[in-house]
Image (spheres, rainbow, N blue to C red):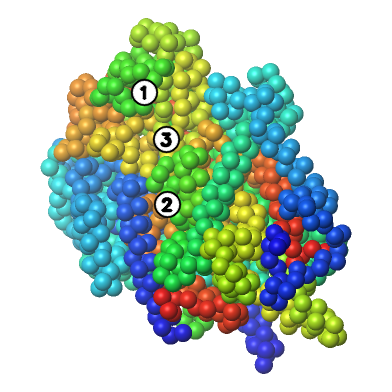
Amino acid sequence: MLAFILRRLGQALLVIGAMVVIVFFGVNVIGDPVWMLISPEMDQNAIEATKVALGLDKPIWEQFLYFVWGAAQGDMGRSFVHGEPAIKLILSRMPATMELALVALLMAVFIGLPLGVYAGLKPDSRISKAIMAISILGFSLPTFWVGLMLIMFFSVMLGWLPATGRGDVVRVLGIETSLFSWNGWTYIALPALNLALLKISLVIRLARAGVREAALMDYVKFARAKGLSQTRIVGVHILKNIMIPIVTVLGLEFGSLVAFSVVTETIFAWPGMGKLLLEAIQRLDRPVIVAYVMVVVVLFVAINLVVDVMYSILDPRVRLTEARA
Amino acid sequence: MRSSVARLAFAAAVALGAAAMPAKAQDLVVGLSAEPSSLDPHFHNLAPNNQLSAHIFGHLVMRSSDQTLIPGLAESWRVVDALNWEFKLRKGVTFHDGTPFTVDDVIATFERVPNVPRSPANFSSYTRGRQITKIDDHTMRITTGVPSPLLPNDFTAVAIIPKGVKDATTEDFNARRTTNGAGPYRILEYVQGDRIVLERNEAWWGQKPHYKRVTLRVIRSEPSRVAALLAGDVDVIEAVPTTDVARLKADQRLSVFEATGSRLIYFKMEMNRSPAPFVTAKDGSRIDNPFLDRRVRLALSKAINREAIVARIMDGAARPAGQFVPDFIFGASPRLKPERFDLDGARKLLAEAGLPNGFKMTIFGPNGRYVNDTKVLEAIAQMYTRAGVETSIETLPPANFFSRASQGADGWPEFGMYLTGWGSSTGEGSDPLRNIAATFDAANGFGQSNRSRYSNPKVDESLKKAIATMDDKERAKLLAETNDVAFADQAIIPIHYQVNIWAAKKGITVTPRVDEWTLLTGIWKQ
Amino acid sequence: MTDIPHGSRQGGQEIPASPGLPAIPKEETPFTQFRKAFFDDKVAVAGLVMFSVIVALAVLAPFITPQNPYDLRSVDIMDSRLSPGSQAGEGFTAWLGTDGVGRDLYSGILYGLRISLMVGALSGLIAASIGMAVGLTAAYAGGRIETILMRIVDLQLSLPAVLIALILVAALGKGVDKIIFALVVVQWAYYARTVRGTALVERRKEYVEAAQSLGLSNARVVFRHIMPNCMAPVIVIITVQTAHAIALEATLSFLGVGLPQTEPSLGVLIANGFQYMLSGKYWISFFPGLALLLTIVSINLMGDRIRDVLNPRLEK
């Protein structure tokens, strides 16, 4: 197990290296950041001075080597736009995004799982059909469109919840979070729901499919024959069986939640790192894009690792192949 | 165990919820469309930064809502001779921490401006070559290398810092260690990407603003910004999307405020090379650059139905344009009117220019940089196609667009014809002439944005004479004449000036500004 | 020997009886069985009918619309934002209204459907093929090949779809081919990973060992025995991903890097109408949204049934 994890971490470094190269040169293809930074009436000398100040006057490969040299010493570069260390900017925005993604993930599980299990157990009931219809709607509509609908309905028409922004933040165990105040929850409810909608539908479908499949398995039939209660059959045997795909998918989907927060954060003006990334892309703030990619890749590799380990624990038939590779 | 945690959380929630309800009469929440990139007033010459600096630090000279110069930290100024100015500073002004404001602070500011590390767009063009001599604490003489009638305009861009923080870094400002200024507000809280909380400076020298505590929230998505106002999250929003103006005006709970802006939306055409990029005959074969013919440029201007664009695309929130700046701006020509829509005239001119069958081109524009930019481009492509110039459009994200518009793969501006915008940063008319109409001359700072490489010696000569003229009246006349020459020649094709729009809850008055700034000193309770 | 995909967990003793279905005569092909089972379900049939109508409308668009929305000569801004049912200046009735530049929405939606369907279907099929090939190869080959392939998949999955698509499309420029390329790039790894996950479990099962010990070729084991058992999750993902691909395309348009404005897909139409959402001109975004919704719902209704039918363990 330890060898497996170590190997994975080694590979993670390779992944990060490859990603950084792609992003570094990819962003360079899009355009020269200097045109997004300067004010239009600056004269040519001032523009050249800006290029020199930001290191943009050098050829791209030289800029890259310079970046690698800095990164080796723990310096990931400074934002062109903000002049602050890029990593610092991202980490300062991270708690807001993580908080949003976490609440969305919890919503997906706590709303999706019961509905999906119900729909799987009673596939022909009217309620199940309604649940499935809603789940189809859930991933049929683009996130940004649903986001504005939520704002229109809950904020503009009903006036129940605030339309944009993040609520009051308190520091808990060194991390800033808005989850410890009522005010904070009123702010996070809509964006988290918006972000979770797709995942709720996904969990409903996975759970329903899993339950239907498991219900026909011999061991469940056997358990029924033995006279075990329905609660026990569902709670222990079926749930255990359907958790495998759900854990896998949700593990992967957490990353997608963090990524899709780009859209949700833009609509709800949520001050997370997704919004920072979009602004960085729009302004070609390369150090921030690269740093974001590094942070996110580390995060996702870690998630994948956890998912794989849990997968092997939940389903012992799966071997962790890499250990022998 | 679990329930006690829950109870604790609930108790905390109630306590915090109660603490978070201070919606007092003197509180205001403003939804901004763009965020300052830093609190350092000399880091980035960018409208949102300068707007914030005006609140915290203040400037020697200020611009009124219609762009006339008004005294700021300087009480008065006068021309001594062609190369010397004398400025009298306001007496009795203090910074937030109580230290008095003197000439020494201005000198310190001028020393810091050119030396901000990693500044993406610094302010040194406003301070370069300007020598300050202290006469007494509140009087200074400024010596310039060349006659500089625009000196007071330039001073509207340089935020004044106290001399004690001359060596502060950008991080010091961002961490609010050195945000001590002489502006009407002081900064209480700064959450990058989210909000800036300001508190009124009770000791400010000017008329005390109404709102004591102001939260600036950054909401970049347009529908979200409007929704935030409709939902009551914010009290005022800037940059109201044109599509929503009618609805907001009809809403009894809201008021809308508008001012014609100085931002011109216009076309540039390649006027140096032949053939022009992305321009061909209708069968795709090569043709000489048609834009080199003034008649073609005029035809392309006549083919635009500006009134229709204003009415149908901009929902009335624009004014048809016939020159670089609207007629109320210093230096505008009273003789230039928007070109009238004349389809037959356009076709006739094309025929006269030897293009009776028109030609084919792709026009370019940024997507999301200017109000309704893509739709304006689409509408004009329709109009050109009707006039016989088969036009397709390509819009690009601004990052991509400006990079390629300035320098394509071969180092030249890449597009043959493209839509762009210009807002006069000095608040007067010489600025666009100098940057767009003057012959490209990087070394001397002329034609910086003249990517079409238009060149007319008459324009250059007239402009150079104007900007060395110290007398305001005479200079305004010369600038107007320069505009006449440039537009007789169709140097660019002007389309419209954007209208700047604010919306607020009923009972709040916003002074609409020509320069798109949202200033808290202009927001009042009725 | 039977061709029904292997479902028995007990090691190849017998196929479990299907109590709900009448006995199927042996000579029927799997396709006939599939068709029968599919048409058993009224909802699925409704989905199929709906989808067929949508596809027919899209294919026939040039013949049944009053306007070619891509031809700038036939679009007039004086007709912009007409409400549904208004008379357009060009002499036809805009039953669904017009958009912000005067495009007839009914025509725009039908032409947009063509693009959206093509983008969704092409990117989905290409991505699924690549993903399944990679996933099966990894699971079956194991060892170094698996490690390398799954590292590439990780590399892919470690970057968010929106981010890759955003950067790709921003760097490549706008265009249908570029969007499809970007959508394939962001989708294939999902299939690869899921197929590999399922195949890993399958390949540990006794029937595979049995097949191998019978001396069946690797290709036969993979394609005849392992692959059919991986189809259920692939089909779930296809239904999810087709919807996702179309929505992602719309999202990219919303972020300003999607398809060209002049040849709008449904996504571009929705994104354009997005601005009008609060202004009361609901139709500009609502009708394209409805078209998108119906398209995806019909795909999903069919997908659900196909999955139920293809997986023999789910027979009622």
The Cα–Cα distance between marks 2 and 1, rounded to whole angstroms, is: 29 Å
Q: Secondary structure at mark 1?
A: strand
- Type of the residue with mark 1: Val
Q: Residues within 10 Å of mark 2 (few under 14, many from 20)?
A: many
Query: Could you tell me residue B40's position as x and y percent?
Result: 32, 61
| Above or below for B412 versus B290 | below
Q: Quadrant of the C terminus of chain A?
A: bottom left
Residue A307, by quadrant, is bottom right
Q: Secondary structure at mark 2?
A: helix
From the image, tell me which residue sits under label 1.
Answer: B279
**Res. B511 visible in picture:** no
| Above or below for B463 versus C47 | above
| Discs 1, 3 touching: Cβ within 8 Å | no
Which mark identifies residue A145?
A: none
**Res. B287 visible in picture:** yes
From the image, tell me which residue sits under label 3.
Answer: B365
Question: Which residue ends up furthest to the bottom in the rendered image?
Answer: B1
Residue at the spot x=46%, y=63% of the render?
A: C153
Q: Which one is in front, B394 or C225?
A: C225
Q: Which one is in front, C7 or A265?
A: C7
| Front tag of 2 and 3 | 2
| Chain that bears disc 2 | C
- Type of the residue with mark 3: Gly
In the drawing, does residue A76 fall left or right of residue A231? left
* Disc 1 with disc 3 on a shared chain: yes
